[in-house]
Amino acid sequence: MLTKKQKGINWILTAVLLVLSLFFLFPVVWMLANSFKPDAAITADMNTVAAFIPPAPGGGFFHNYLSILTNTNFLRYMANTLFYAAILILCGIVVNGLAGYALAKIHFPFRERWVLLILLLQIVPMETILTIHFLMIAKVGLLNTVAGYILPMIVNPFNIFLFRQVFLNLPDDVYEAAQLDYCSPLKYFFTMVLPMSKTVVATVSVFTFLNVWNDYLWPSLVFTSSNLLTAQIGLNSITSNENTTMGQTLAVITMVTIPVIIIYSLFSKQIVEGVTSTGSKEG
Amino acid sequence: MKKRSSSLLGMAFFGPALVLLTIFLFVPMVLTLIFSFTDYFALNPDLTHFVGLENYGKIFRDDLFVKSFFNTVCFVLIILPCQGIGALALALLINRVTHCKKYFKVAFFIPVVMSLAVVSTLWMQIYSPEGILNTMLGNLGIPAQPFIHSAKQALPSIAVMSVWQGVGYQMIIFLGGLQAINPGLYEAAEMDHASEWQKFKDITLPELKPLCVFVFITVTIGAFRMIVQPMVMTGGGPSHSTYTMVYNIYETGTVNWEIGLASTMAIVFAIFVMVLTVIQSILTRDKEEGKHVNKKAKGN
């Protein structure tokens, strides 16, 4: 039971946080409200509270959004990114998952050394080898191709290790039973191991998606052709165009954020667990 | 027989990953190290010489590299206290209140969800000379500020934006840590009529110490790797005031094709980040050992 004094403090702190959160969110509120306005209205509203209030719904409410969707390649960029994310999730689960399984359950030479190596690899920042990646992809003529973008990103020491840690806890007797039924190891992996480890598969998929969707540096190096751009690079090319209005810019960045919001609201539990347990993704 | 088939199977499962690891991690790492001792210029590879440690001396005499290094350090020094302490303060406040908890968690986490490119584009509008921030400041009687358009304010402006974007992430980490503290400790302190400050100083802070180390080091590493914000917002300017180490590596290597020099910078950068990572793993390993000891003590 809270005392009267404690209740008072509680209300004061809540009020402080409420004010703080409003200040904190003003850029986001401003972005959303003004993405529905023509530029003249954005400038006119700037000095009043109306800057944080969306216009009344009516004709032209979605004008900025519709003009971006019809006049630019934006939908194409979003579709591209979804496609790349899908390939990378599939390849990543197969390659890193198989490796994690081997390191957890199969006895083969130097296994413990490989595990140590995978652990050590995680401390090398990717920016170090960025130049060489770019040089390699350029030398083999894969600049401006989907393969050039995807190949260096499939293998991920962090995910291999994550898979290994989860597979270590799988029971061995299921494998022995499966072997008696002449189940091939590969079939066993895809029909038994992965379905038994839904949580880690979901975690890896979600983080891969967020990585691909938000990545900027690598796709900006590989892609120059407008047909292949990802949403983030496309967003930059649209908003740096002089003909793009402020309202359209705000509409673009809102649309780029929508898929991420959907992913976060669907998988918030996995994400928060991932953040609080390891927290080692980005700073 | 069985042993041989199992090692074949192991290599078959590990093989695809090993091939990709070799091509895209081991080889590039070794190449970066080798190229850092050469004057490799990708547009004229035939003229490559082995130059020993010359590049390493060269980059530290290069004003631009030194500037990009100090810009990066400066960025870290602004980010670290603001984001670390800010996140801790938010977590403490949110942990304390009983109403709208969920709303506060979501509200401060929203910028984390937005990508760096989105946040940078948004804040370019907010920081613009006639933008919403200058309008709001004007209403308070503060003259318009140039923000990202002046050499003096550009880096701090980007730092403020980065804190805004990142603080919610560390807040969630701290909230997780606060919830893991044994409530019995506080109950015992209340029996002894400990003040709020004493409870914070003697219970909360020591219990959160390992987490603080973790957060401070990951924030530092993240800030060290900064590049997207200046790429989108300022192009490294005005007068290279927002030019960071990674930006320098990126331009030297992929724009000017001076792979030798870029590799040297990349090695110096990697050493800094790896030293920080090793410090972190040493300091947080202590925490796990500590837990282990505690468990043992409880068992007895």
Image (cartoon, coloured by chain):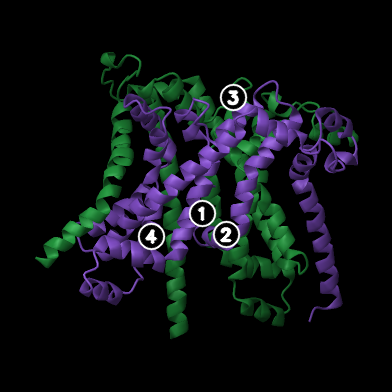
User: For the residues marked 3 and 4, what is the alpha-carbon distance in whole angstroms?
Assistant: 39 Å
- Using the rendered image, report if marks 3 and 4 lie on a common chain: no
- Is the Cβ of the residue at disc 1 closer than 8 Å to that at disc 2? yes
Residue type for callout 3: Gly
Q: CA distance from mark 2 to mark 4?
A: 19 Å
What mark, if any, has residue A267 been given in the picture?
2
The residue lying toward the viewer, choosing from B66 and B117, is: B117
Q: Which chain is purple?
A: A
Density class for disc 1 (Cα within 10 Å; few <14, some 14-19, many ≥20) is some
CA gap between label 1 and label 2 equals: 8 Å
> Is residue A171 shown to the viewer in this render?
yes
Q: On the image, numbered disc 4 is attached to which residue?
A: A163
Q: CA distance from mark 1 to mark 3?
A: 31 Å
The answer to whether marks 1 and 4 sit on the same chain is: yes
Q: Nearer the viewer, mark 1 or mark 4?
A: 1
> Disc number at residue A206?
1
Taking B12 as reference, is B162 left or right? Answer: right
Say whether disc 1 or disc 2 marks the residue closer to the N-terminus. Answer: 1
Apparent side of residue A77 relative to residue B82 in the rendered image (left or right)? left
The answer to whether dots 3 and 2 both sit on one chain is no
Q: Amino acid at mark 1?
A: Val
Q: Position of residue B60 (x, y in %)?
A: 44, 25
* Towards the viewer: B26 or A184: A184
Camera-nearest residue between B163 and B199: B163
SS at mark 3 in the image: loop
- Residue A275 in the image: state x and y as whole percent: 54, 58
Q: Element type at marker 2?
A: helix
